[in-house]
Image (spheres, rainbow, N blue to C red):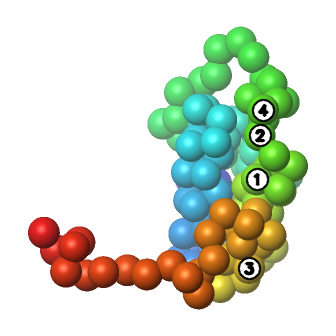
Amino acid sequence: APELAAGLGRAVPRANDMWGIGAIAHLLLTGQPPPQDSGAAWGVASAAPGFPTRRGGSDEAAWQDRSDLSRDFVRRLLVQANLRPSAAAALQHPWLKAVVSLESAHWDASVASG
């Protein structure tokens, strides 16, 4: 999370995890890490040290073929720590609910264990 990278404030593990989920979702949806300036809203110069600097293109172009709901999901996670939703709240986002019904999802541990 950008606040950790910049050494601002104390760590809030759940909020940091949610920023990480947002960063991963951004990468999976657009093929690019979040913009380097996604932490600028709270005075963090670099949102994700170690992410390669984007060459050419823009974040807008990367989202061109994605749904507004998917972008909204990511935007809600890549915000200041105190504004990030909990995992339970994020699971209630309309984009996730449209993709899979958690009630109908079934995890078979015997398959996962090999």
**Residue furthest out toward the front:** 104
Q: How many residues crowd around disc 3 within 10 Å: few (fewer than 14), some, or many (20 or more)?
A: few
Q: In this view, does 88 lie above or below 93?
A: below
**Left or right for 105, reference 89:** left
Q: Reading the chain from its start, which is encountered first: label 1 or label 3?
A: 1
Q: In this view, does 112 lie above or below 29?
A: below
Q: Do the residues labelled 1 and 2 touch (CB within 8 Å)?
A: yes
Q: Which residue is found at the position 64% from the left and 57% from the top?
A: 22
Q: Which residue is farthest top? A: 56
Give residue 107's mark.
none
Do the residues bearing badges 4 and 2 touch, measured as CB atoms within 8 Å? yes
Three-letter amino acid code at the position of disc 1: Ser
Q: Look at the numbered disc 1 and give the secondary structure of its residue.
A: helix
Mark 4: secondary structure: loop
Label 3 is placed on what type of residue? Answer: Gln
Element at badge 3? loop
Residue type highlighted by circle 4: Asp
